[in-house]
Amino acid sequence: MRPPGRRAAPTARPVVPTVRLLLPLLLSLLRAPCGVGAGPAELRVRVRLPEGQVTEETLQADSDADSITLELRKPDGTLVSFTADFKKDVKIFRALILGELEKGQSQFQALCFVTRLYRNDIIPSEAMAKLRQKNPRAVRQAEEVRAPEQLHMDIAVNFTQGGLLSPHLHNVCAEAADTIYTRQEDVRFWLEQGVDSSVFEALPKTLEQAELPRCRQVGDLGKPCACHYSLSLAWYPCMLKYCHSRERPAPYKCGIRSCQKSYSFNFYVPQRLLCLWDEDL
Ligand SMILES: *[C@@H]1O[C@H](CO)[C@@H](O)[C@H](O)[C@H]1NC(C)=O
């Protein structure tokens, strides 16, 4: 057990000024257990979904790999995961959608959406790795609801080559090998960063040619269409809070701000069959 007090414990990284983050009501960012190769730090929090239900969310941070992973299960059984790869400026959304077996659908369908990671999307992995919570039973609700984002996914990612974009892709998107999507504007950025162009493949028809009908309007299960999928990150630390103190010369990190954000993806499917959840309400 570590002493809970306010005094500094010895740290393995004397060069880096250790941050002590405190958010009195919710979470404390205490000193990491420390040591190189300590493995990813994990935090399980109970969160309220935008629809009102409560679910458990797992947040993992690996400061060596400089990445964060968030995972949550929706009430309908869908497993949503989000991976932030700070080394490669890549974020990966994955949804494992349960099929309705009585309708003859396969057990689950996997989708992967890969877009550019921005620095202000989520807090850095080393800060995330230090997050601790005082009350694991508390149901957390985001302090800020960020504007929902609509993303037009017009490029396919070749799974075999995916490791050139991010080393996480092979693990995260293994079940979605044929359904990994990204966007032209993000591809342009990664190509400038030196990512090999063999990772990306044009899709047969871009949605911009408005001729492609929305899947919900297509009756023929064999026809291509524009599919739609939405997901939400119910609760995640999106910003660091800074405090001022008379005893310290500069503002210091003292907590986090939590956000919620929804993403809505549009993408091409070669068959209506691959987009059965997109139905008229
Ligand atoms: C993906 O890339 C590999 C290696 O370049 C290639 O052999 C394969 O045909 C590509 N897959 C598709 C679906 O284009």
Image (cartoon, grey):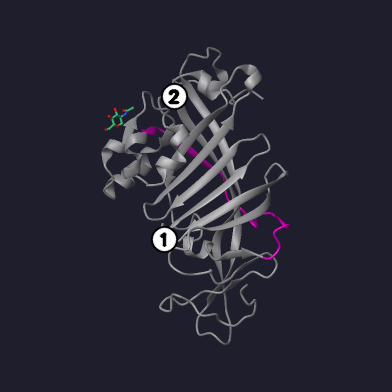
Q: Residues within 10 Å of mark 1 (few under 14, many from 20)?
A: few
Q: Please report the bounds of the magenta region as a residue range.
A: 134-157
The residue pinned by badge 2 equals: 210
Seen at 63% across and 21% down, the residue is 101
Q: Is residue 29 left or right of residue 140?
A: left
Front residue (pair 185, 252): 252
Q: Name the amino acid, label 2.
A: Ala
As helix, strand or loop, the secondary structure at mark 1 comes to loop
Q: Residue at x 52, y 62 (%)?
A: 129
Q: Quadrant of the N terminus?
A: bottom right
- Distance from Cα at disc 2 to Cα at disc 1: 44 Å
Q: Is residue 216 above or below residue 110?
A: above
Q: Is residue 90 above or below residue 180?
A: below
Determine the residue positioned at 39% across, 38% down.
183
Counting residues from the start of the chain, the first of labels 2 and 1 encountered is 1
Q: Position of residue 62 (x, y in %)?
A: 47, 58
Task: From the image, tell me which residue sits under label 1.
Answer: 64
Of residue 47 and residue 4, the one placed in the foreground of this image is 4
